[in-house]
Amino acid sequence: QFAKEQGDETTVWTVLRKAPPLPFLPPDVHGTEIIAFALFHAGDPEVGRKAIEPVRHFGKALGEFIGVQPYRSWQQAFDPLLTPGARNYWKSHNFTDLSDEAIAVVVKYARNLPSPHCEIFFGQVGGAAMRPPADSSAYPHRNTMYVCNVHGRWDTPAEDRKGIEWARGFFRDTAPYATGGVYVNFLTDDEADRVKAAYGPNYHRLTEIKKKYDPQNLFRINQNIRPDIRPAA
């Protein structure tokens, strides 16, 4: 509800995970279950402070790190938690809304994280991203209010099965509440069949463009759009 009430200048990300050892969190809460809000306001700092004030009263705040910073710093905010060497697997859905039933599924999986590095996050989209027509660019999901990524992350190969099954289970059980679409940057190597879902009704037009400019599919080390090789009618 809070996210829906915000103007274009304010964006809210919600992260469910175990508290990482960040300097603004007390040591006694490290490793405990938390809900973290990553907030961004692109505008007057004082207006931003007032806009996010209600979030500070959503239950007991364990810590906060709020202030004016360069945009690049915001982009890099999560980098300290993504150190090299870990094993990662994720899945993603788009949502137009989050019902009580959907939230119940999210909470169920958030309470059963297979490792302390795993997380579930919802990024608010909405705003200007919803206004262009669906066929105005390759990205078609103009009805998406939230993008969700379930991020499995662990340290050893012995944890692979448990982590992957957890992420896939979350993806399966939240699918009935999602749109069926996905943001292409969140696709994984084993999801080539979901590239069509990333581009929706624009996929066929993209295959025609691919056929014109890259008929041999030279540029294919990606979430690949194959050339349209169907014979002309």
Image (cartoon, grey):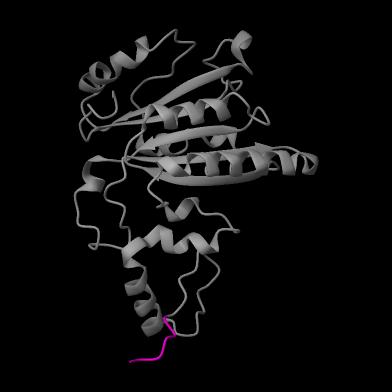
Q: Which of 204 and 3 is in front in this view?
A: 204
* Residue 27 rendering spot, x and y as whole percentages: 62, 11
Name the residue rendered at 49%, 41% in the picture: 149
Q: Is residue 161 left or right of residue 98?
A: right
Name the residue rendered at 22%, 30% in the picture: 43
Q: In this view, does 130 lie to the left or right of 190?
A: left
Name the residue rendered at 27%, 40% in the picture: 126
- Main SS, magenta region, reads loop
The answer to whether one can see residue 83 in this image is: no
Q: In this view, does 167 lie to the left or right of 12?
A: right
Q: Which of 168 and 16 is in front in this view?
A: 168
Q: Nearer the viewer, residue 13 or 81?
A: 13
Residue 218 inside the magenta-drawn segment: no
* Residue 202 rendering spot, x and y as whole percentages: 32, 66
Say which quarter of the image contains residue 57.
top left
Name the residue rendered at 41%, 51% in the picture: 180
* Residue 205 rendering spot, x and y as whole percentages: 32, 73
Residues in magenta, as a range: 228-233
